[in-house]
Image (cartoon, rainbow, N blue to C red):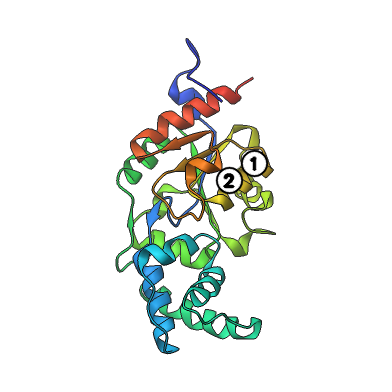
Amino acid sequence: MGADRAGGQSKTAALSGAVIAFDLDGTLVDTVHDLVGTLNWLLATEGLAALSLDAARPFIGRGARWLIERGFQAADAPLEPGQVQPLLDRFLVRYEAHIADESRPFPGCIAALEALRAKDAKLVVCTNKLTRLSAALLDALDMSRLFDAVIGSDRAPAIKPDARHLLTAIAEVGGDPARAVLVGDAGTDAGAARAAKVPLILVSFGYTETPARDLAPDILIDHFDELPNACVRLLGACEP
């Protein structure tokens, strides 16, 4: 997926009409404090000790149910299947009320998104978070204006790493998988991109059980300043 094409299209031409799909938690927004804070509140109501941010951070990315299941397991209180839904219901109510207490976009994120939109790229959120919660978070951070659609776990036939989640997000904004890129942070994103045959950019600062570099992204970035050029490189390589 290599380097910029010498003498090729301008950045505007490379990005115009292309779809850039984004994971949310750990990619666009640093949500660990509010998510783990809500998990620890839930653990406390069950008489269990809190988890550190470092211990719980890798559990983020597969949705709240997974976070709760892994969190209780890490707290030495593994759950039976019938216990999860009541805990999930309580978690969601509390989390929605505190969705942006401490959550903030990662440094450079807003500027990078604005730069992509200025080049006529279509931006869509493709997240395993519920759409309602995703929209509430983006609204609270004044980020909804930057996206053409938000496709949460409840708006796709299956969630990442299933290709159908990403393909649904691309289709929602009238895009073509042949001119799309997924930006994420974890194995769920890598799996979805590979299954959908869409180029993959991973951020090095997100939430992942497997280091991002080991997931073999097409491009790994350490800061959002690098994102627009990374998208141009991948989209340029995909041009006929």
Looking at the image, residue 88 sits to the left or right of residue 166; the answer is: left
Q: Position of residue 70 (x, y in %)?
A: 53, 71
Whether residue 40 is situated above or below residue 140 in the rendered picture: below
Q: CA distance from mark 1 to mark 2?
A: 6 Å
Q: Nearer the viewer, residue 117 or 75?
A: 75
Q: Amino acid at mark 1?
A: Arg
Please tell me whether mark 2 sits on a helix, a strand or a loop. Answer: helix
Q: Label 1: few (<14), some or many (≥20) within 10 Å?
A: some
Which image quadrant is residue 29 in? bottom left
> Hey, which residue is sitting farthest top in the picture?
7
Position of the N terminus by quadrant: top right
Point 55% across, 74% down: residue = 69
Residue linked to disc 2: 190
Residue linked to disc 1: 194
Position of the C terminus by quadrant: top right
Please tell me whether mark 1 sits on a helix, a strand or a loop. Answer: helix
Looking at the image, residue 145 sits to the left or right of residue 81; the answer is: left
Q: Position of residue 122 (x, y in %)?
A: 51, 40
Do labels 1 and 2 touch, CB within 8 Å? yes
Q: Position of residue 62 (x, y in %)?
A: 55, 62
Point 47% across, 79% down: residue = 91
Q: Position of residue 98 (x, y in %)?
A: 35, 73
Q: Amino acid at mark 2?
A: Ala
